[in-house]
Image: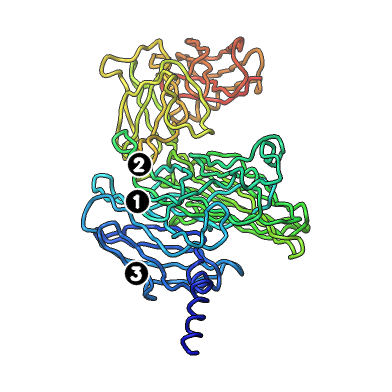
Amino acid sequence: MKNYFCRLLLIFLLCYGFEGLASHMRGGEIKVDRIQGSGLRYKITISNYLNAGAVSDSAGELNLGDGVVIDLSNDNFLVSSEPLNENILLEVYEVFHTFPGPGLYLVSFKEFNRNAGILNIPNSAEVQFYTESLVVIDPFLGSNTQSVFSFPPIDIVAPGKAFFYNPGVYDPDSDSLSYELVTPKQSIDENIAGYVLPNDIQFYDGLNYNSANEANNGPPTFVIDAVTGDLTWDAPGSVGEYNFAIKVEEWRKVTGRWISMGFRVLDIQITVRETNNERPGFEVPKDTCVIAGSLLQTSLLTTDPDGHEVIFKTAGEAYSLAGNSATFVTGSGNTAGTGFLDFSWNPSCENARNSPYAFYFKSIDVPPSSAGAGLAVFGTWNVTVAGAPEGLHGQVKKVGEITLSWSDYFCSAAKNLAIYRIENSFTFPRDNCQPGVPEDSGFELIATVNTDDNTLTDNDGGAGLDPNTTYCYRLVAVFDDNIGGESVASAEFCAQPDEESLVTGIGDREPSDDLADKVIIYPNPAQEKVNINVDLADFRPLVVGISDLRGRVYEKRQFSSQNSHYQISLAGVAPGMYLVWVKTATQLVTRKIVVN
């Protein structure tokens, strides 16, 4: 009799118990980061998302890619266990390891088994869970911190409603990222047999597959943007659980070539549930550019069409910057079914780079249980920080020569400053954060100086500049390739290195109170002409004229006089702000006027 009950117990465990013990893995990831200042010692973090209440007979096996395999069933590796909701438990393991030397190491994790009932993985309860991360150790490429995944790889969607997802990835080293949908694996180099994408036709039974998207005008799609990581499933079909995997690869530009710095694979599970609920919505700000040192503020409002409570979440690299991180405040709106997020950031030039900072937003509604599952929407906002040099101006001290100067540039990440020149002016907007000067602008690189320099004399390499030509300049900060290459160009400065520019002096000298009291310029604003009255105590040479704020001279006259009235025609002068000036041998007076 005793043997009979033992056999029954064994049959029960074989049929039911092992599924309860081991069938539980929903998704997960591995992150491998070098410990600074410790040579080749790394911290490996394994994040597992599993059925809440599941008890595993093994915490899985970590293969470090160098011949070392670690059994994680030892509780010393488990650092946290957190329920995300009534169904999902997040377990985090940490392992510290020293790699033997430079090389490529495929760090992988596997555990028996996935949870039962995953629709696009046949017999999922019998399929091993596996994920991996490729670590590149190369002293010539520099140290690397792997990308960060901000949002859990678990979400809920509704059949027939388009689903949008983004893992909220950013790279602490400012490496570029690419995204790719890959087939989930069950071991190294072994894809899951029979796996299909969630939009496979078999999951749309009873529907017209060719019109199963949300708009009912095309087949369902399941795609990811290789640049932004935005995933769209338009639209889910059968109710149930689906898994897919995203490979996120890091790229670093070294000596003009893009080099892979490794990758991580994120295994994700999405649950499709029937619901009477409508997803919330919000409008993401337009991608923008901000000059370092400028305050960037914005507000986002999320609304739920059903009037349910909504929760705003956000993630991004700039929230964790040392010293001047971005900040946000979230809360409920004044009316039911609304929520807000107030954003603020004042980046410094240390944050300047060509690649944008991505801010990820997620809005989730919280309906009552009678309405079904809550739904989420995602949005991404890209902000580029430009470290533009400022204060570029100049002076003509000698015919054929222009001496430039500019404000000190304090951004330590810059390698040097590049000075560009063009004959006549070429204007282009700076508010779009375009790095450097446009290739087709005609600007010529004439010099590269250290970042602690702030003057340069341009005499065309000793040949002398043409006194009859107006030269315009821009200044650009040059960064390492992995930071961004070049800053936004400075504002343009123009001057003509002739005798008349010596007269105008580009405004560097303080005007004499004596001459200033004797000069009257009117009318202001002016339209057709401007009058200049000069009443001097003695007879002396005078030069009068009008120029724009860049130093370009439009009209000039030279006299020898004591008490005189001069009139300058404004024909052909475009509306704007100008300088009218009067100069003697020792004194200079300038007045700003507006031409209508």
- Disc 3 secondary structure class: strand
How many residues crowd mark 1 within 10 Å: few (<14), some (14–19), many (20+)? many
> Is 238 displayed left or right of 561 in the figure?
right
Query: What's the residue at 42%, 30% (across, down)?
Result: 436
Task: From the top left corner, tell me how far across and down residue 350 is, in percent.
Answer: 41, 47
SS for dot 1:
strand
Q: Is residue 273 above or below residue 403?
A: below
Image vertical order of residue 3 relative to residue 446, above or below: below
Q: Amino acid at mark 1?
A: Leu
Q: Percent x, y for residue 589?
A: 50, 25
Residue at label 3? 71
Q: Nearer the viewer, residue 578 or 47?
A: 47
Q: In which quarter of the view is residue 541 placed? A: top left
Residue 440 picture location, percent across and down: 44, 19
Local crowd size for mark 3, using a 10 Å CA cut-off: few (<14), some (14–19), many (≥20): few
Which is nearer the N-term, disc 1 or disc 3?
3
Residue toward you, 442 or 475: 442
Q: In the rendered structure, are the residues bearing label 3 and label 2 in contact, judged by CB atoms less than 8 Å apart?
A: no
Q: Residue at x 54, y 20 (%)?
A: 580
Q: Amino acid at mark 2?
A: Arg
Mark 2 nearby-residue class (10 Å; few <14, some 14–19, many ≥20): many
Q: Where is mark 2, residue-wise? A: 252
Between discs 3 and 2, the one toward the N terminus: 3
Give the secondary structure at mark 2.
Answer: strand
Expressed as whole percent of the image width and height from the top left, the position of residue 368 reads 75, 64
Question: Mark 1 and mark 3: span between their CA atoms?
Answer: 20 Å
- Give me the disc on residue 134: 1
- Which quadrant is home to the C terminus? top right
Nearer the observer: mark 1 or 3; the answer is 3
